[in-house]
Image (tube, rainbow, N blue to C red):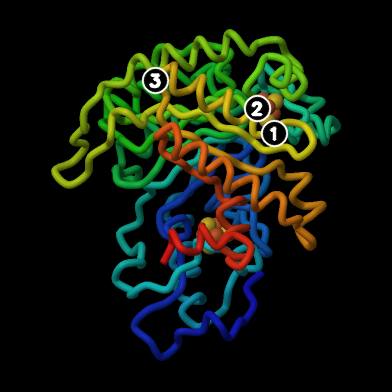
Amino acid sequence: MFKYNQKYDCSNEPSFYSCPWIQHGLVFFRYKLTMCCYCGHVGGGHTLVKDDYNGQPINWEHLFKQKRTFNRLYKKGFINDNCVDCPFLQKRPAQEWENESGYISNLYISHWVDCNCKCTYCFEAQHPEEFQFKHKPYSVLPILKEMLQNNILKRGGSIHFGGGEPTLLPEFEDIVRLLLDYKFYDLRVHTSGIKYSPILERGIREGRLRVVVSVDAGSAETYKKIKQVPQYDTVRENARRYAAAQVHRKHALTPEIYMDGDLMVGTKYIVIPDVNDTLEEVESWIKADVEAGIRTTIIDLEENWFKAHEQDLPQSIFDFIHEIKKLSDKYGTHFEMYERVDNMLKENPERAPWYAQGQA
Ligand code: SF4
Ligand code: SF4
């Protein structure tokens, strides 16, 4: 549903509000196609392209017409409910936005739920009824091949995997191989790290694919408490193997774009208050990374906790994030915050002055 919202009205201007996903994005979810995978803001994201989707051929003409309709309405301030207050909605000159040529460069593949661990915070753990039918996921590979053949999928954006555990997806290796063969870059794969994937190793070596291993802990004990599988040592070993595939130089992906070979592998720590929010745990996590040659420190905040405390966030969570940043600086790692944490700091600059100063 599109509703008029004065703050986005650019009727008399050469610029208008949009985002890279409205212009060139497509997301494969289990039962639907959407424009984006973002959901941490008021409107809720996951802006719909098609409901009841299960791998049917895509009517590209119709899809790009939909995107042009978004442009037409957004210029006048009529915004889709799902996009309201999204931090990705930005005002830019019309010629930078308009998808007249009709192509996709931002992809998110997230249409299966199978996983090899059982995180306590997982959507699956919270809603087991939705996951009772682990039906065979539809096949994305033929759609990607069609997109490549028809020049609908182009390099220059980002291609990410979500869903359950990507390495368990039967066509995962084939999809990644296809994209690497076509010289795509900015591929990002989130993995539990329990199963080692040689195709990920190839992507890391070529400087085209970043792997994010979900660890959430600095010890086997905490890992088991959160992930509910005794795989800490396996995950650390696989993360070390991925890191060993990094080539320590700048990879020239295009004449203008370089990727730092040292930053191809990161581990992610979802802060879960009262479970893993101690500095000792975080320091052991970062130290284990550095010893393994991993130079990227990624944090997020547990979604259920965040939703329950969103209106009354304690100062302690802001301070804890700051302490993690300081530890990352101490060990010389590249610090990344996922959308939820980043938005929280952006929206509350007085509670995280260190962050506001860094942005200034
Ligand atoms: S919710 Fe945000 S990222 Fe998604 S399509 Fe809307 S503006 Fe873009
Ligand atoms: S790794 Fe992801 S999909 Fe698997 S259990 Fe954890 S949160 Fe769920």
Q: Distance of mark 1 from mark 2, alpha carbons?
A: 5 Å
Q: Are marks 1 and 2 in contact (CB under 8 Å)?
A: yes
Does the closest atom of ligand 2 sit within 8 Å of the Cβ of label 2? Answer: no
Q: Distance of mark 1 from mark 3, alpha carbons?
A: 23 Å
Q: Residues within 10 Å of mark 3 (few under 14, many from 20)?
A: many
Q: Amino acid at mark 3?
A: Gly
Q: Amino acid at mark 2?
A: Glu
Residue at screen point 27% across, 24% down: 206
Question: Which quadrant would residue 230 be assigned to in this image?
Answer: top right
Residue at screen point 27% across, 36% down: 259
Question: Which quadrant would residue 4 be assigned to in this image?
Answer: bottom right
Report the residue marked by disc 1.
278
Report the residue marked by disc 2.
281
What percent of the width, then of the height, locates residue 263? 36, 31
> Most extreme residue toward the left, as rendered?
255
Q: Quadrant of the C terminus?
A: bottom left
Question: Which quadrant would residue 192 be assigned to in this image?
Answer: top right
For the question of whether residue 245 can be seen, the reply is yes
For the question of whether residue 113 can be seen, the reply is no
Q: Amino acid at mark 1?
A: Thr
Give the mark nearest the N terminus, 3 or 2.
2
Write down which quadrant ligand 2 falls in: top right
**Label placed on residue 293:** 3
Q: Image check: 198 left or right of 344?
A: left
Q: Is residue 202 above or below residue 57?
A: above
